[in-house]
Image: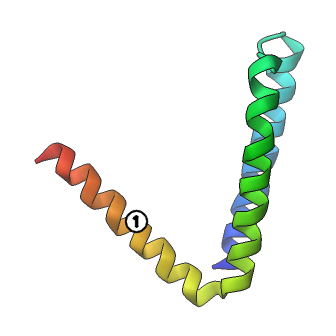
Amino acid sequence: MLKTNGTAKIIIFANNLTATIVYGLYKNVDYSLAVPILIPVVVGSWLGAKTAVKIGSQKLKIVFQIISALTILKLLNGVL
């Protein structure tokens, strides 16, 4: 689970970096908004990754399943 999550993060990072460069080249980035948001996002990502590594794959899998189930219930609640 940890290796899968780490692999997904590097793919997402590469995707976002590429998009950021392209948008930046065309001057379509609002840096006055992006920079203040970037700081808590980086801190949250760092804490999340550190927590995931600390709790291990088995517990991370359980947390993922609980969050997935809660998300499904919330989505179904909106449909029903």
Looking at the image, residue 4 sits to the left or right of residue 76; the answer is: right
70 vs 18, nearest the viewer? 70
51 vs 76, nearest the viewer? 51
- The image position of residue 22, as x and y in percent, is 83, 22
Return the residue found at the far top. 27
Rendered image quadrant of residue 15: top right
- The image position of residue 78, as x and y in percent, is 20, 44
* 40 versus 45 height, above or below: above
Q: Residue at x 83, y 10 (%)?
A: 26
- The image position of residue 28, as x and y in percent, is 77, 12
- The answer to whether residue 3 of the structure is visible from this angle is no
- The image position of residue 60, as x and y in percent, is 58, 80
Looking at the rendered structure, the secondary structure element under dot 1 is helix
Q: Label 1 sits on what residue type? A: Ser
Question: Where does label 1 land, which residue?
Answer: 68
Q: How many marks?
A: 1
Q: Residue at x 40, y 65 (%)?
A: 68
Q: Residue at x 74, y 45 (%)?
A: 40
1 vs 51, nearest the viewer? 51
* 12 versus 67 height, above or below: above
Q: Residue at x 49, y 72 (%)?
A: 64
Q: From the image, which quarter does the N terminus lie in?
A: bottom right
Rendered image quadrant of residue 59: bottom right
